[in-house]
Image (cartoon, helix red, strand yellow):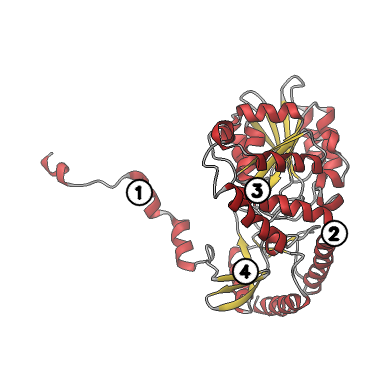
Amino acid sequence: MALSLFTKTKKAIVERAHDDYATKMRLKYKPYYHTMEAQQGTHIRLQGKDMVMLSSNDYLGLSFHPKVIEACGKGAKIWGSSTTGARISNGSRAFHTELEEKLAAFLGREACHISVAGYVSCVSAIATFAQKGDLILADKNLHSCLWDGVRLSMATAERFSHNNPEDLRQIMKDVPSKAAKMLVVEGVYSMEGHICRMAELAQISEDAGCFMVVDDAHGFGVLGRQGRGTVDHFKLNDKVDILCGSMSKSLASTGGFVSGSRELIDYLRTNSKQTLFSAAIAPSQAAAASASLDIMQSEPQHLERLWKNTKIYRDMLKGLGLDTWESETPAVPIVLGSKELVYRFWQALLEKGVFTVMSIAPAVPPGKDLIRTAVSALHSEEDFAKIADAMAYAVRQM
Ligand SMILES: Cc1ncc(COP(=O)(O)O)c(C=O)c1O
């Protein structure tokens, strides 16, 4: 008894962190959390070496656009560095509502609500509207934030196979017609680069009386008129109840948005814990997103260049016989099928000055371990020459 007073037992949670195998492997092989020393457009410096960035989500290449940088600085100068408060209490400012109105108008929606991260917005797009007793029909390859939204809602989730309307139709046959239902899909799947088969899925959703939520983090800025996104691309605005997304990709900022009818967004503003109890997006970040949105509408060359570059890049990978999982967008995976191959390929690219990101199971389905790459409008001919050389080298190392 006396001894136990002096023997300190380790806290179970500290022990769990200490023993975690995945963390040990990450620290040993250092595949993630690389700290870049400098960046200029698509060029970064890592451990003193110049590299081409081939995995950022700066699809339109606006993060170094002079107007965006100027707006960012001006935002902080006028409004300070932060509003240090939640929107519902002391954190709401004119620049928030201006951006929300501008985004809503661009998307053809009545209203929009912005938050500090796409992750937060997408969680709230589900967790606010679905509740215990409801049924959520979810594409099995949804992003982690959408699964978090599903879990938080406490609704029952039913997964259908990825981008497969036939499977959804089958599942719908056994669903009680009276249950409140929600369908959740992504406009463009971030790992796969697949465009959602939205026309068929939206029709099934409508026939079954489903509330439809689309996360268009990777379709916004990329598809549709002037980059209005996947819903606009398919002309399905009237079939989608909630359209959410991120401002950290094509809008070259950070933050997220949820858009829909005024009634739904007002309901979200009253009921979403993610906005009620979290500080508002900072002035400089809202200003950057706002400037990017203006550029998307006044400078079409970025979107044109993005698709031109995407074609160049996809043809290059095809020529090397690489499996791109039939990606249709600038988010292009290179599927290698095992974590060992992915690691070797990634290292070979790094050696040749091309920075990419590894994605291995369980982040992707088993057997789909991949290198995640993404094209930007900013990639130049010289960048592609370097990328082609590195890809050919990595293929030879396999
Ligand atoms: C499909 C999807 N939704 C939401 C998010 C979250 O966006 P953010 O990085 O702005 O939090 C991401 C981020 O990668 C994403 O890929």
The residue that label 3 is drawn on is 286
The answer to whether 86 appears left or right of 103 in the picture is left
In percent of width and height, residue 192 lies at 73, 55
- Is the residue marked 1 within 8 Å of ligand 1, measured from its CB? no
Q: Residue at x 54, y 40 (%)?
A: 279
Residue type marked 1: Val
Residue furthest to the front in view is: 78
Q: Earlier in the sequence, mark 4 or mark 1?
A: 1
Q: Which of marks 4 and 2 is nearer the N terminus?
A: 2
- Cα separation, mark 4 vs mark 2, equals 39 Å
Residue 45 position (above or below residue 26): below
Image mark for residue 300: 2
Task: Name the element at disc 3.
Answer: helix
In three-dimensional space, the C-alpha distance between marks 4 and 1, rounded to whole angstroms, equals: 33 Å
Q: Where is residue 108 in the image (x, y as percent from the top left)?
A: 83, 39
| Residue farthest toward the left in the current orientation of the protein | 2
Answer with left or right where residue 150 lies relative to residue 186. Answer: left
Rounded to the nearest angstrom, the CA distance separating label 1 from label 3 is 38 Å
